[in-house]
Image: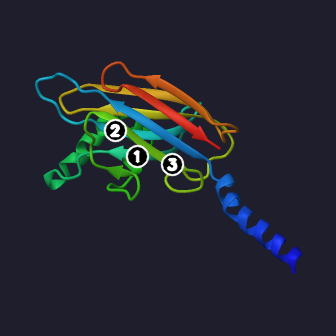
Amino acid sequence: MRRLLTVTLTGMAAAPLAGTAMAADLSVKVELPQLAVAEYHRPYVAMWIEHTDQTPVSTLAVWYDGKKPNAEGTKWLKDLRQWWRKAGRDLTVPADGITGATKVPGEQALTFTDGKAPLGKLSAGDYQLVVETAREAGGHELVRVPFTWPPKAPATASAKGEHELGSVTVNLKP
């Protein structure tokens, strides 16, 4: 009886760890700077993963003004030129789990889990996280952050924009 109890408890203790060890996380922090301009509009932002040859893999997030009358907010999505050509024109918005409202200046954080939408199951390899932003009556900017998937150890990579984007940081957790 004592021996059976020991085996059962060991199995119960290991079960929660088995599920978490398989799922890697990709966390992204994007800084939207406060701009001192006469007419400020919150930026439209697209965030996606692409291979190092710039072929798109998955759109992670799109922030736009979906509350404008007559869906006028969608017409500005074309100003996210790189994303629009690669994936935007094929995406029906609003898209569950991908699209959201524009964000205020400051740091925005998102976390994506391997095997779950919108990240999906990435095969092993080298990738780039791409963040593109555009504002009505404003500027446009794109930042790429290279990373390797799956992470074998916790890792951080970052890049910095010059005007419309501040720092973009990717944290990888095995």
The amino acid type of the residue labelled 3 equals Phe
Pointer 1 or 3: first along the chain: 1
| Label 1 residue SS | strand
Q: Please report the residue visible at 24 percent of the width from the left and 44 percent of the height from the top.
A: 75
Looking at the image, residue 139 lies above or below residue 152: above
Q: Please report the residue visible at 42 percent of the width from the left and 40 percent of the height from the top.
A: 47
Say if mark 2 contacts mark 1, CB within 8 Å: yes
Task: Report whether 111 appears left or right of 21.
Answer: left
- Give percent across and percent down for residue 169: 48, 31
Query: Residue furthest toward the top?
Result: 162
Q: Which quadrant of the structure image shows residue 31?
A: top left
Q: Please report the residue visible at 30 percent of the width from the left and 39 percent of the height from the top.
A: 78
User: What separation in Å lies between label 2 and label 3 (alpha carbons)?
Assistant: 17 Å
Residue underneath mark 3: 112
Say if mark 1 contacts mark 3, CB within 8 Å: no
Residue underneath mark 2: 45
The amino acid type of the residue labelled 2 equals Val
